[in-house]
């Protein structure tokens, strides 16, 4: 009986000792905030740490990385949390990157500045701070200001936004990422007859049907491939569009005048 009690007490003692040691060893002693971007930007690291909710002395196992990331990105719209890394036994690293401004869209009497994920990273009536960036102007779409605040993502469940996201994803697959998007395109215009017109800096306009037998992303892939095959010199605007019967069509006129163009030139 005594031997059994000794074994029980020994097990309890080992368990308690393990808890105590674990609480000490795995208590956060240091939090490093690392910015991956090479851009010359500065942020209040103390404020970022406070916003994350990660505190020194808490167990590394109780850190809610998802909530910490969301809170940081909401408070600092121009930052993206790449990951929150636990460095055992007791250190934490918050890896950050800066979000790249790509698009601008009217926001009442101001502009909302969006990145590749359509996150609103800034709202401003003065674009002077973006004078070195060729922001792509989005027109034909209205942001609901009650639903879209600074730090929010434009996640509208609409055909237009779904098409825009597909186009951005496909361009990135083609290597057209961040600044390359704004260097390639001047404007994205949603028109009433279910089309997205993407005007390039070279005078070529992509015309994508937001409702067709091919997705907007698939259309964009074909139009971009055709765009890359074309030379940069031209005397007049050119439109590249997707036709459900004839595939990729290149015309000197708006694609909805395609039939007129065929009649005038080939019949």
Image (spheres, grey):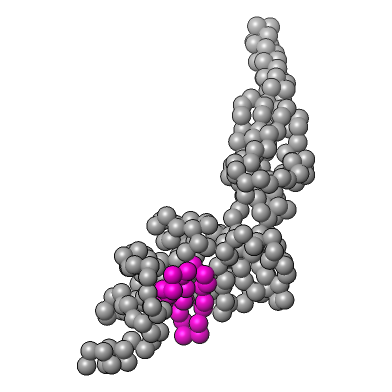
Q: Observer-nearest residue: 40 or 246?
A: 40
Q: Quadrant of residue 111?
A: bottom right
Q: Quadrant of residue 3?
A: top right
Residue lying farthest top?
Answer: 3
Q: Observer-nearest residue: 237 or 239?
A: 237
Q: Give percent across and percent down for residue 217.
A: 40, 66
Q: Quadrant of residue 216?
A: bottom left
Q: Observer-nearest residue: 39 or 26?
A: 39
Residue under the point 76% across and 30% down: 57
Residue lying farthest left?
Answer: 267
Q: Give percent across and percent down for residue 245.
A: 27, 80
Residue 55 horizontal side relative to residue 181, left or right: right
Q: Is residue 166 magenta?
A: no
> Which quarter of the image is occupied by the N terminus?
top right
Q: Is residue 211 magenta?
A: yes
Residue under the point 69% across and 49% down: 72
**Is residue 209 visible in the rendered structure shown here?**
no
Residue under the point 33% across and 86% down: 258
Q: Main secondary structure of the magenta part?
A: strand
- Give the magenta part as a residue range: 185-212
Q: Give percent across and percent down for residue 264.
A: 28, 93
> Which quarter of the image is occupied by the C terminus?
bottom left
């Amino acid at each position: 009986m005594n031997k059994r009690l000794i074994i029980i007490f020994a097990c309890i003692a080992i368990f308690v000792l393990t808890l105590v040691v674990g609480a000490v060893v795995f208590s956060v002693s240091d939090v490093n905030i690392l910015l991956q971007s090479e851009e010359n930007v500065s942020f209040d690291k103390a404020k970022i740490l406070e916003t994350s909710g990660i505190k020194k002395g808490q167990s590394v196992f109780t850190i809610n990385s998802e909530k910490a990331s969301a809170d940081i990105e909401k408070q600092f719209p121009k930052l993206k949390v790449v990951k929150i890394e636990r460095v055992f036994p007791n250190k934490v690293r918050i890896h950050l990157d800066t979000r790249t401004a790509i698009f601008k869209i009217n926001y009442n009497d101001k502009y909302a500045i969006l990145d590749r994920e359509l996150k609103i990273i800034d709202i401003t009536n003065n674009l002077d701070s973006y004078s070195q960036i060729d922001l792509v102007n989005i027109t034909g779409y209205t942001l609901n200001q009650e639903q879209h605040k600074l730090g929010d993502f434009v996640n509208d469940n609409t055909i237009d936004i779904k098409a825009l996201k597909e186009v951005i994803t496909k361009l990135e697959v083609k290597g057209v990422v961040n600044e390359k998007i704004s260097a390639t395109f001047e404007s994205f215009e949603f028109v009433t007859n279910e089309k997205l017109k993407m005007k390039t800096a070279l005078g070529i306009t992509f015309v994508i049907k937001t409702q067709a037998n091919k997705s907007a992303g698939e259309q964009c892939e074909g139009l971009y491939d055709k765009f890359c095959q074309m030379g940069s010199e031209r005397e007049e605007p050119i439109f590249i569009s997707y036709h459900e019967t004839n595939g990729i069509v290149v015309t000197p006129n708006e694609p909805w005048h395609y039939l007129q163009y065929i009649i005038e030139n080939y019949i």
